[in-house]
Amino acid sequence: MVATLSMSRIADLVRLQETDLALDSRRATLADAEARLGETQDLVDQRARAEELRASVRAAEASQKDVELEADALKAKIAPAELKLYSGSIKNPKELGDLQADIDQLKRHLSAVEDRDLEALSAVEAAQGELSTAETQLAAIEQAWRDEQAEFRDRVERCTAEIATHEAERSKQAALIDPELLARYDHIRRVHQGRGVAKLDRNLCLGCRISLPVSAVNRARAGNTLVQCPNCERILYT
Ligand SMILES: [Zn+2]
């Protein structure tokens, strides 16, 4: 038990608590900033969406290319057939008629393929448009993410430096305090939300907001014995 203590000892504890609270706050900020470092779900999702759309564009382009090749193959059949038709080399009317019919059939087929080619081209354009929009969104998300990450890295750096300063200060402050009293303060701090000392306001403990018995208030006011709040255990100061 710490039987007696001077006012300056309590003042040392109060200063120590200020440092401890500053440390707690910096450590919480540091932990929060560290947890936010890294890619966000939004970024990962948008990147995946852009990748999907790039695949869609490639697929649409491949389909359109297939249709174009189909049209080219038909044209490659029609051209020599027409040459033959108009060359005058075929005299037989039945043979001429059959050739004409074949050419007409190929041209109808070509016309249908060319319609599909137009549709395939608009599908490529639509896919490219979607991709372009998604890439613009991705670029904006990436930029905002990079800015935010830079801020979190700054915060980590700043908090780490501040924590080092406060820790050095705490070591100096703790060295001035009776080890038994310091141990008691540390214990109370651990079990009572980081606060080991509480100010007394009239007869009210500001640590737990409970009114104290007159005897405890008077002893705390006298300031030469260690008085703990009977409710929250915090070391009282006036
Ligand atoms: Zn209390």
Image (cartoon, rainbow, N blue to C red):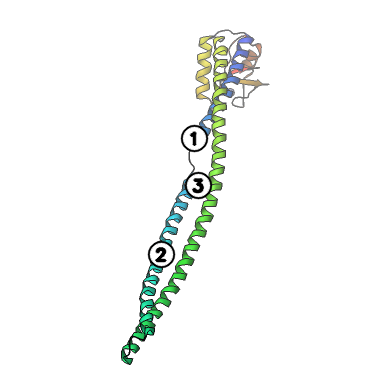
Residue 61 vertical position relative to residue 190 in the rendered view, above or below: below
Q: Give the SS element for disc 1.
A: helix
Residue corresponding to mark 2: 65
* Residue identified by numbered label 1: 35
Between discs 3 and 1, the one toward the N terminus: 1
Cα separation, mark 2 vs mark 3, equals 35 Å
For image coordinates 53% across by 12% down, the residue present is 181
Indicate which disc residue 104 carries.
Answer: none
Which of 233 and 197 lies nearest the eye of the viewer?
Answer: 197
CB under 8 Å between discs 2 and 3: no
Which labelled disc corresponds to residue 42? 3
Please tell me which of labels 2 and 3 falls first in the chain: 3
Q: Are marks 3 and 1 in contact (CB under 8 Å)?
A: no
Please tell me how crowded label 2 is: few (under 14), some (14-19), or many (20+) other residues with Cα within 10 Å. some
Secondary structure, mark 2, is helix
- Residue 194 seen anywhere in this rendered image of the structure: no
User: What is the three-letter code of the residue carrying label 3?
Assistant: Asp
Q: Which residue is drawn at 54% across and 32% down?
A: 153
Q: How far apart are marks 3 and 1 (CA)?
A: 16 Å
Q: Nearer the viewer, residue 186 or 84?
A: 84
Q: Where is residue 174 in the image (x, y as percent from the top left)?
A: 55, 13
